Amino acid sequence: MQKILLTGGHGMLGKTIEKVFSNNDFEVIVTDYHNADITDFNLFDSVLKKYEVDCVIHCAAMTAVDLCETEIDKAYLLNAVGSENVAKACEVNNVRLVAISTDYIFDGESDRPYNEFDIGGNCHSVYGKSKYAGEVAVKTFCRNHVIARVSWLYGAGGPSFVHTMMKLAYNDNIEQLKVVDDQVGNPTSTIAVANKLVEIVNKHNLTGVVHLTCEGEASWFDFVTEIYRIKGIDKKIIPCDSSEYPTPAQRPKNSRLDKMVLRLHGMEPMPNWRDALSEFLDSEKF
Ligand SMILES: NC(=O)c1ccc[n+]([C@@H]2O[C@H](COP(=O)([O-])OP(=O)(O)OC[C@H]3O[C@@H](n4cnc5c(N)ncnc54)[C@H](OP(=O)(O)O)[C@@H]3O)[C@@H](O)[C@H]2O)c1
């Protein structure tokens, strides 16, 4: 039986990964801030030595994108230094590392989906820059690594865009919603990511960057339109520009990721985002 260790195991993606890997006969060691703080190299190294795992799936991060703009040191401590610690500990303990990253490492100016060989790091947000610094650390300090970029995630329990929109749907005080229509990306379920990670962990010759987002594309407006269509919710939604909703962190206009590496390795594509969303909405209670 293969043994994996999860960082950030109590987060939204971590919880789904634990469930899916356990269902696929992996032994899963779930760690988080309280028992394996990634900002403490010695502590994390001792945890790895104790459990003797085959692979680490590194989900821990500071994910509050807007908060990263003001808590800059904390963002780099978790996303850059934390990832460096995880990478160094994996290297010295001879453990394969699968590190989760994000579409936000790109600036979003391209008019086509970004593939795994496009250069990132030219993004505008602290979150994106700190996650990119984490990617560089993983590449630099751990030879046996995979960097799996995901985006626009939703999963059991949330928090996510889907959960927010469902809460608003049942709020009778809100008659209509304005939703941004000029940012486009790949809405992605944590189940789809976790299922593909099982294949990747079993595929030892895959190293480097891989994009793991659902197929097909949508704006946030398209995304909520589909959520409400599937759930039969009759609430007026009005498309708007992101300039109407200024946020501390600038989001990429184009967040679409091409899954070139899955194709090059002859692997099955990710599910279409509408199918994955429909499956999720059937299973989640709001
Ligand atoms: N959610 C998205 O839409 C999205 C999109 C693209 C990429 N990603 C990436 O996907 C990964 C998982 O995201 P998620 O949505 O599951 O995030 P999440 O729910 O915020 O989970 C992150 C986890 O990391 C933990 N953590 C924080 N500081 C830590 C530390 N010092 N040591 C160990 N653990 C620590 C958090 O614990 P506390 O809650 O106790 O702080 C939390 O359980 C992240 O790498 C993120 O950058 C997410």
Image (cartoon, rainbow, N blue to C red):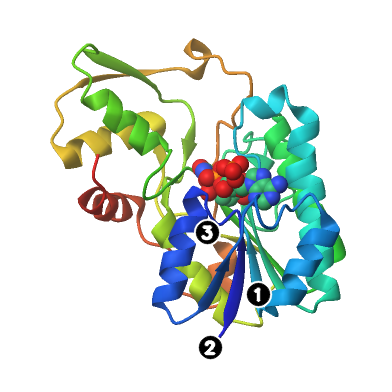
Q: At 48% across and 63% down in the image, what residue appears?
A: 17
Quadrant containing the C terminus in the rendered view: top left
Q: At 48% across and 65% down in the image, what residue appears?
A: 18
* Ligand 1 within 8 angstroms of badge 1 C-beta: no
Q: Residue 197, can we see it?
A: yes
Residue 96 in the image: state x and y as whole percent. 71, 75
What's the residue type where badge 2 is placed? Met
Q: Which mark is residue 55?
A: 1
Residue 37 in the image: state x and y as whole percent. 72, 52
| 172 to the left or right of 34 | left
| 185 to the left or right of 165 | right
Instruction: Indicate the quadrant where residue 271 lies.
Output: bottom left
Q: What residue would you read off at disc 3?
A: 212
Helix, strand or loop at mark 2: loop
Q: Is label 3 or label 1 in front?
A: 1
Answer with mark 3 or mark 1, whichever residue precedes in sequence: 1
What's the residue type where badge 1 is placed? Cys
